[in-house]
Every structure is written in structure tokens, then in C-alpha cells.
Image: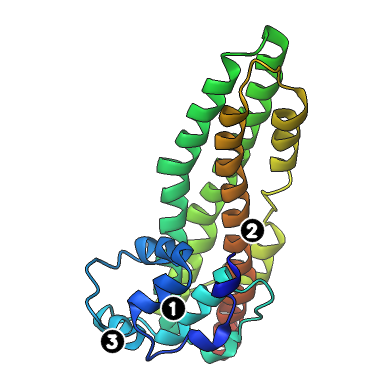
């Protein structure tokens, strides 16, 4: 993240949205995933959150998670009322990756493979396809198992089900294999694959890796603690 986006003092409820984006334009992706509509005018973060019936504490916490590498969220400041908004944000991230990012990276892979021989095509294509399958399985597990549980818990409808700690035990890390793809692109593709082609593809791959890592942190540092507090509150 950009260094000017790491000053936590600027992330406050009375800060204007336009000032937030000027401080770190990468946070536009958070607004997109929360379906917050432009234009902003001169409204503050607090005003925007009230307009969208979302707690400013949750919004600021997500922004800090993305902008500040050393930020440790205080999930105790959130409640079960924040869970539907948090799940909506996480689900929207899934759609963004599946509908936009992964297809874009796939087109970049197709471009670089045009300069490769058969063996190189088979190796890179297999790594990429296998990784996409792993991402889809991971997201499908969250969509069909973990998120519905959280939503039922927020509505007070949970019965004899497994609990959040067990969901998190089955929660795999999906960032590791990106390093394999990166190494192939940097080290082993032929010179006929241009530097521009490689760099364009690598920028997208690194961006996906960082986004996935932040997503995992949001789930482990915000979602899971809030859910576990709610479970204890309900005597589950």
C-alpha cells in the first residue's frame, strides 16, 4: 500500500469520502464491493455509513485492514448487527474475483502462451487452471457453508451445527500457489514473450495475491472473532 495511506489518524468518521480516496485510491475497491454509489459530494464517512445503514466502525476497520500493513483490528467494537454487512462485502469480493479478476488474468495467460512452446504451454496452463480450481473450491466452501452459517447466526436461527472455530480449521490458504505461477512467468518463459506481456500479467497476479491475503485477514481478524463472541453470547 502507498505510504500516505498508512497514517491511521486520517481514518476517522468525520473524514470526507473524497479525502479518504485521495489518501489511498486503492480503497475505491471497498466502496465498489459495498455497492456504495457515486457521486459522494462532500459527505463524510459517518454520513455515508448512516445513509447505507452500516456502522462506521466496521467500514473504518476494513479500510485500515487494507491500507495499514501493521493494523490490528479491535473486533470487540463490532456486534452481530455488523455481520450481514461484513458477509455482503466478502461475497462481493468473491464475485469480483470470479467475474473480473480471474478472467482478466486468464486473458493475460493466453497472451503470454502465444510465445511459448508446447511444454511451456502445458506447464503454465496446468498451474493456472489448477490454481483457479483451488480458488473456486475455497470460495464455494465459504459461499455454501461458512457464510450461510454466519447469516443464520445473525438472525438467531442457528441450531445443531458446527461452529465458527471448525469452519476456520477448514479454511485453507489460497495464496501459496501464486508464487509458483510467478516463478514460471519470471524465470522460464522464452524471450519472445515480451517484458510488457509479463509485467501486465504479473501486476494482475500480485494484485490478486494481495487482495486474497487481505480477504483472509478480514475473515480471521474480524469475521471470526465477532461470530465467536455472538456464539458465546447465545450459549452455543
Nearest the viewer among 34 and 9 is 9
**Residue at image mark 3:** 47
Residue 59: numbered disc? 1
**Residue at image mark 2:** 213
Q: Which residue is at 74% across, 41% downward? A: 179
The alpha-carbon separation of the residues under discs 3 and 1 comes to: 12 Å
Secondary structure under the numbered disc 3 in the rendered image:
helix
Nearest the viewer among 37 and 141 is 37
Secondary structure under the numbered disc 2 in the rendered image:
helix
On the question of residue 157 being in view, the answer is: no
Secondary structure under the numbered disc 1 in the rendered image:
helix
Image-quadrant location for residue 69: bottom right
Q: Which residue is at 62% across, 50% downward? A: 209
Image-quadrant location for residue 234: bottom right
- Location of residue 202 with respect to 191 vertically, above or below: below
Residue 167: percent from the left, percent from the top?
64, 63
In which quadrant is the C terminus drawn?
bottom right
Residue 177: percent from the left, percent from the top?
72, 41
**Label 2 close to label 3 by CB (< 8 Å):** no
- Location of residue 130 with respect to 52 vertically, above or below: above
Binning the other alpha carbons within 10 Å of mark 1 as few (below 14), some (14 to 19) or many (20 upward) gives many
Q: Foreground mark, 2 or 3?
A: 3
The alpha-carbon separation of the residues under discs 2 and 1 comes to: 18 Å
Total labels: the figure holds 3
Disc 3 or 1, which lies upstream in sequence?
3
Image-quadrant location for residue 225: bottom right
Binning the other alpha carbons within 10 Å of mark 2 as few (below 14), some (14 to 19) or many (20 upward) gives some
Binning the other alpha carbons within 10 Å of mark 3 as few (below 14), some (14 to 19) or many (20 upward) gives some
Q: Which residue is at 49% across, 63% downward? A: 147
In which quadrant is the N terminus drawn?
bottom right
Amino acid at each position: 500500500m502507498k505510504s500516505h495511506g498508512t497514517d491511521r489518524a486520517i481514518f476517522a468518521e468525520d473524514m470526507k469520502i473524497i479525502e479518504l480516496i485521495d489518501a489511498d485510491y486503492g480503497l475505491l475497491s471497498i466502496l465498489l464491493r459495498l455497492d456504495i454509489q457515486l457521486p459522494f459530494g462532500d459527505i463524510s464517512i459517518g454520513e455515508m455509513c448512516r445513509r447505507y445503514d452500516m456502522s462506521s466502525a466496521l467500514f473504518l476497520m476494513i479500510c485500515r485492514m487494507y491500507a495499514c500493513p501493521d493494523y490490528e483490528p479491535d473486533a470487540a467494537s463490532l456486534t452481530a448487527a455488523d455481520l450481514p454487512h461484513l458477509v455482503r462485502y466478502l461475497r462481493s469480493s468473491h464475485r469480483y474475483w470470479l467475474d473480473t479478476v480471474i478472467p482478466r488474468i486468464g486473458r493475460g495467460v493466453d497472451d503470454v502462451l502465444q510465445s511459448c512452446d508446447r511444454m511451456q504451454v502445458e506447464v503454465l496452463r496446468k498451474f493456472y487452471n489448477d490454481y483457479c480450481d483451488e480458488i473456486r473450491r475455497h470460495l464455494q466452501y465459504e459461499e455454501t457453508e461458512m457464510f450461510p452459517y454466519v447469516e443464520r447466526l445473525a438472525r438467531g436461527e442457528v441450531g445443531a451445527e458446527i461452529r465458527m472455530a471448525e469452519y476456520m480449521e477448514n479454511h485453507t490458504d489460497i495464496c501459496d500457489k501464486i508464487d509458483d505461477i510467478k516463478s514460471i512467468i519470471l524465470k522460464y518463459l522464452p524471450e519472445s514473450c515480451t517484458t510488457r506481456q509479463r509485467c501486465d500479467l504479473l501486476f494482475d497476479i500480485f494484485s490478486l495475491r494481495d487482495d486474497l491475503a487481505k480477504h483472509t485477514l478480514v475473515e480471521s481478524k474480524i469475521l471470526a472473532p465477532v461470530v465467536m463472541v455472538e456464539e458465546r453470547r447465545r450459549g452455543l
